[in-house]
Amino acid sequence: MSKIEFERVSLRFPHSSRPAVDECSFSVESGQFVVILGPSGCGKTTLLKMVNRLVDPTQGQIRLEGKDIRQFPVTALRQRIGYVIQQSGLFPHMTVAQNISVVPRLLGWAKERIRERVDDLLSLVNLPPHEYRHRYPTQLSGGQQQRVGLARALAGDPDLLLMDEPFGAIDAITRSKLQEEILRLQRQLKKTILFVSHDVEEALRLADQILVMHKGRVAQFDTPFRLLTQPASPFVKELLGADDMVRQLSVLRVETAMAEIPHNHTIQEGAVVKPQESLRRALSVLLRTGAAALTVWEDGRAIGILTLDHIRDLAVLEETPAYGAQGSA
Ligand SMILES: Nc1ncnc2c1ncn2[C@@H]1O[C@H](COP(=O)(O)OP(=O)(O)OP(=O)(O)O)[C@@H](O)[C@H]1O
């Protein structure tokens, strides 16, 4: 069953000439990392805020695990959903530990359990607990504040995380480190994540699926690879910068382009890549080893293969810019 379903959801703010979100329909499976991507003002934040009912649609229905979200008491709904925003939203008068324990305290956990949880979460986001638990938000860098914001969002162990440009105000180096970490956490914790971004590279790097929005509507909902190889419209193609192949190769992960292992596949020594490595690295391994196919290897077993043809699919687009209806709304 889908984790989250939007069915013809619209929202028109009072006195606006057009809806901020316009007939959006899509569904997100459990454990998926979905990036909502689009230019400023296209409705990304509004769409996200509808999930935890900070705003309500004027039309349509949103379901969580098959149930209309209006049927949940709002506080119960929000306790199931972690929320991370750009300026961390930490309470300035509370220590890091107190900030992280807001939800566990609301849930009535025992003190000892809360203390353990805080320390576990700080370790999870790579902040040594003994060093950070007693600090106040002003005593943290922007990147550290975002880590604490993430720890706080994870505190009640929600299945679903909403992240609104969480790394938007962070310098490029810290940002790419945080991106790596959120991917690691996603693999480890298997949360469903809806992540708003207007940064195409961030979206390509992080997403299992990207929901491209344009003027309140879903322009296309698809995997990064498919968006690049089969953009549904000139808008999508232009937004993704689908012409810049070198850039795409360096941000797309091997797992987004790999294929199933054929029966006759043999593993060639040295011709092995990990699913999270970039296609650019895979290309260099292909060229260096001269292998017909790379084996994609994870947790001690082969999970897929990658050939030059798979990578070449990206290049084909440059010659034949045909717009498919794939996944578009
Ligand atoms: N509370 C509100 N009242 C009236 N209009 C609003 C309100 N919030 C958002 N809007 C309008 O709805 C539209 C979508 O806004 P939203 O913040 O969802 O866009 P966004 O894609 O997240 O933009 P950005 O990337 O700039 O944050 C915009 O035209 C905005 O002006």
Image (cartoon, rainbow, N blue to C red):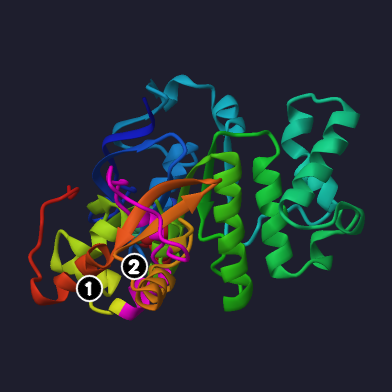
Mark 1 surroundings within 10 Å by alpha-carbon count, few (fewer than 14), some (14 through 19), many (20 or more) = few
Which one is earlier in the sequence, the residue at label 2 or at label 1? 1
User: Which of 151/1 is in front?
Assistant: 1
Asked if 306 appears above or below 177 in the picture, the reply is above
* Residue 199 visible in this rendered orientation of the protein: no
Q: Residue at x 22, y 73 (%)?
A: 238
Quadrant (top left, top right, bottom left, bottom right) of the N terminus: top left
CB of mark 1 near ligand 1 (< 8 Å): no
Q: Which residues are magenta?
A: 246-271
Residue annotated with mark 2: 291
**Element type at marker 1?**
helix
Residue 6 position by quadrant: top left
Residue 238 numbered mark, or none: 1
The amino acid at mark 1 is Glu
Q: Name the amino acid, label 2.
A: Ala
Q: Residue at x 15, y 70 (%)?
A: 317
